[in-house]
Amino acid sequence: MEKSTGKTNTAVFISGRGSNLKSLINFSKNKKSPIKIKLVVSNNSKAKGLKLSKKNKIENFLINFKNKSYAESKVLKVLKNKKIELICLAGFMKILSKAFIKKFKGEILNIHPSLLPKYKGLNTHLRVIRNKEKFSGCTVHLVNSRLDSGKIILQKKIKVFKNDNVTNLSKRVLKAEHKLYPRAISKLLSFS
């Protein structure tokens, strides 16, 4: 990997409010951070995270995923032009195809709001509460062709309280995500 700044060129993929994007931007500004965020990719023109990237002078790339193979090939071209070596999925609500994962030459990370391999997919907090789990948490993992199944980099465990509902559990898990994602990136890049 060729790094002029000594930092890994990174793209963050979002679909929504961008709270993990915000924590990653703050992390990237740290002198010791191993990443430089060069691009924010979104499939949603109303994603609040896009305002955040503009505010921080990070280029946005908006793409409609109705035609997935077309969208993915466009995204791959942009990633190549920007010399992106790391993709961080941060609330990106589209599943990347096997072809995309294979063609992208760097690493792809995702953060998921459960202790994988438990509760892959959506509605994790609701399922955790319904099943009366004592713990939940979040996981940063490498992306492979199977949903939420790649190699786990780091996890953070959160206690589930008896009076928890989806809203307050998701807030606590999100706080943990904001701390875990930067740590997982540092861990991954210190080995690559």
Image (spheres, rainbow, N blue to C red):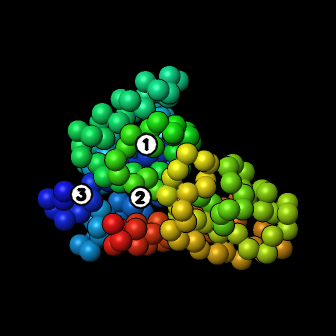
> At x 33% / y 73%, what residue is drawn?
190
For the residue carrying disc 1, how many other residues have a C-alpha within 10 Å: few (<14), some (14-19), or many (20+)? Answer: few
Name the front one of labels 2 and 1.
Answer: 1
Tell me if residue 26 comes above or below residue 110 in the rendering.
below
| Marks 2 and 1, how far apart at CA | 28 Å
- The amino acid marked with disc number 1 is Lys
Kindly identify which residue carries mark 3: 1
Q: Is residue 77 left or right of residue 16?
A: left
- The residue nearer to you, when weighing 113 against 108, is 108
Q: Residues within 10 Å of mark 3 (few under 14, many from 20)?
A: few
Q: Position of residue 177 (x, y in %)?
A: 54, 66
Q: What residue lies at 71% left-to-right and 77% top-to-bottom?
A: 159
Image quarter of the N terminus: bottom left
Q: Give the quadrant of residue 86.
A: bottom left
Secondary element under disc 1, as helix, strand or loop, is: helix
Question: Label 3 is placed on what type of residue?
Answer: Met
